[in-house]
Structures are given as structure tokens and as C-alpha cells.
Image (cartoon, rainbow, N blue to C red):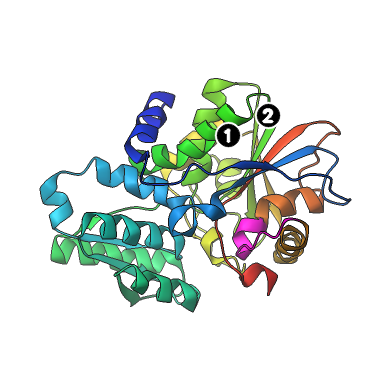
Amino acid sequence: MVTLADIEHASQHIAGKVRRTPAQQAGPVKQPITDADLFLKLENLQVSGSFKARGAINKLAHLDKTEIERGLVTASGGNHGLAVAYAGWRMRVPATVYLPSNAPMVKETNLKAWGATVVRHGAVWDEANEAALASATQTGATYIHPFDDPLVIAGQGTVGLEIMRDLPDVDAILVAIGGGGLISGVAVAAKAINPNVQVIGVEPFGAPTLRDSVRAGELITLREITTSANTLGPRRSSRLNLDIISKHVDDIVLISDDDMRAAARWLWHESGIGVELSSAATAAALMSGAFKAVAGQRVCAVVCSAGTDGIM
């Protein structure tokens, strides 16, 4: 399992290599967003465009010279691939990123701008990941998992560490869930510092991977993914993430793609924040009532990545 000490060590390893993003107060907001005192943790301002840079940099900090020199390979819906490409660019080593067909073309363009080799394979992340693992076996490249890795989770957990330092009296933290790496790290950090803080996960109705797994008490593989928020759509998580989430996350709520689109437009019109669809999931949970905040409650919603498809 991952501990607060692991996350504090990760914070030291990534310092100066990623940005310490603000937890910005949303300001006076009209209904139906929330009666709560709302803060937005702006990981859309993070280098490479998302929180994923934290985990990738922490992982590379623990690799030996030989592992790094073999090059890097991963599979991604886009954001983790960008983080690995950024880390490879910093270390001057090649990175190959396998993308499923549902990853937006802009992700491929940005990956190539960081110097990564892009391979399209499969319809969803899980299929792209099988190809990435096979490539790592064949080429000897070092494989970087986007969520099933304690070092990656610890890196993502620095988001929670920063929230708790900036907002020590926060009552609830909302986190979107894809594979579960971000919420795993955030939950470990937040609960270790204040066991009473609520940590709420948010998934699309079209990809309730971890909601269903937590309820079943075992890993569930979804038969299909029907959400347009591709970065929230693996068909299966991992035992590591399921164990952490089952222990530390208070609830997982579901929202629709339309909820996310409405929330993305609200973020743009209210605060000038441009996000991809998945990044509006936490605001969507508030707007839709999937998570009902109490008046006066201090709530932090993690805005996990940048983009424009949410407001198109």
C-alpha cells in the first residue's frame, strides 16, 4: 500500500519539475452549482496539461540508469502518455505511447510535440495497454503503468498533500476516477492528515469501473465503455487501486456526459477555465446533485486536466 510518507517523499522528488498548482476559490456562484464554499484545484495548469506529470516524474526518479536508458513505453488515453513523454523529454530518452482509437487527435499531436512515438492500437485503453506490454517485452523498454504502480500513485497523491496544506479545514474533496491512481493517492494523503475529510470519487455512467468493483468487493471488467470522456474509461482497474479506494474513499457517484458538458461550459463561462470533458466531472457531480454539498461546507473539486473538447 501507499503511505503518507511515500507521498511526502514524492513531493520532494518532483519539486522543481512540476508546478505547484493553486486551489482557487470559485467565488460567488449561482445555482445549481452548490451552496458550499467551493475551491478548484487547478491541475489543468500542470506541466504537460494534467496531474499525470506528478506520477510519471516520481516513477522516473526511482528508476536506475539502465532502466531509463532502455527507453520508456506506456499506454494512455492521452494524459498519462503526455506525462511520460514529458518525463522522457526531460531525461533525453525516447518514449513510445500506445493510444486507443478513442483518444482525441490533439493528444497524438501533443505527444509528438514532446518527441514521443505514437502507436494507435485497439478501441479502448485496455487494448492499447496489452500492446504496450507486449512491446516492452519485445524491446526491453521500461513500461510505466498509469495507475497500478505505488510510485505513480504516490506522485499523484501530492495533489492531495497540496490541498490539505492549502485548505487545512476542507470538508470534502471530489476527484474524477479513470483507473484510480489519482483518487488513490489523494485519499491516502487526505485521510492521513485528517481522517474526517470526505473523499468522493466521480465516474461516468458509461464507465463505472471502480464503483462497480467496490460494490462487488472484487475487480470488475466492464463489457463496454459508453462515455465520451475517454480518459475516464478503462474497462478494468487494478487490485492495488481497488484496495486503497475501498479503504479510504467515502463514496463514488456517477454523472452523465451531458452533466460533464454542462459543467465544462460553467467552468469556462464562470472562471475562464478550459477543460476536456473528464476534467469537468467533479463540477458535474455538484451541478447534477450527484454529490449534495451542505451549505457552508468547504469543498475542493480537482480539475484534473486542460483541454477544449468539454466546451465545444
Q: For residue 274: magenta?
A: yes
Residue 212 higher or lower than 263, as above or below = above
- Residue 87 pos. (x, y %): 31, 55
Query: Which residue position is annotated with label 2?
Result: 170
SS at badge 2: loop
Horizontally, residue 110 falls left or right of residue 277, namely left
Residue 1 higher or lower than 300, as above or below = above
Q: Is residue 164 visible?
A: yes
What is the quadrant of residue 130 in the picture? bottom left
What is the quadrant of residue 94 in the picture? bottom left
> Which sits in the foreground, 23 or 290?
23
Horizontally, residue 253 falls left or right of residue 230, namely right
Q: Amino acid at mark 1?
A: Ile
On residue 199, the disc is: none
Quadrant of the drawing holding the C terminus: bottom right
Q: Amino acid at mark 2?
A: Val
The tag earlier along the polypeptide, 2 or 1, is 1
In the image, the segment drawn in magenta is: 271-280
- Residue 78 pos. (x, y %): 45, 65
> Which sits in the foreground, 200 or 274?
274
The residue under the point 64% across, 49% down is 202
Quadrant of the drawing holding the N terminus: top left
- Count residues near mark 1 (Cα–Cα under 10 Å), then give few for <14, some for 14-19, many for 20+: many
SS at badge 1: helix
On residue 163, the disc is: 1
The residue under the point 27% across, 55% down is 90
Residue contact between numbered discs 2 and 1, judged by CB atoms under 8 Å: yes
Q: Is residue 1 visible?
A: no
What is the residue that sits farthest to the front in this orientation? 16
Q: For residue 171: magenta?
A: no
Quote the CA–CA distance across marks 2 and 1.
8 Å
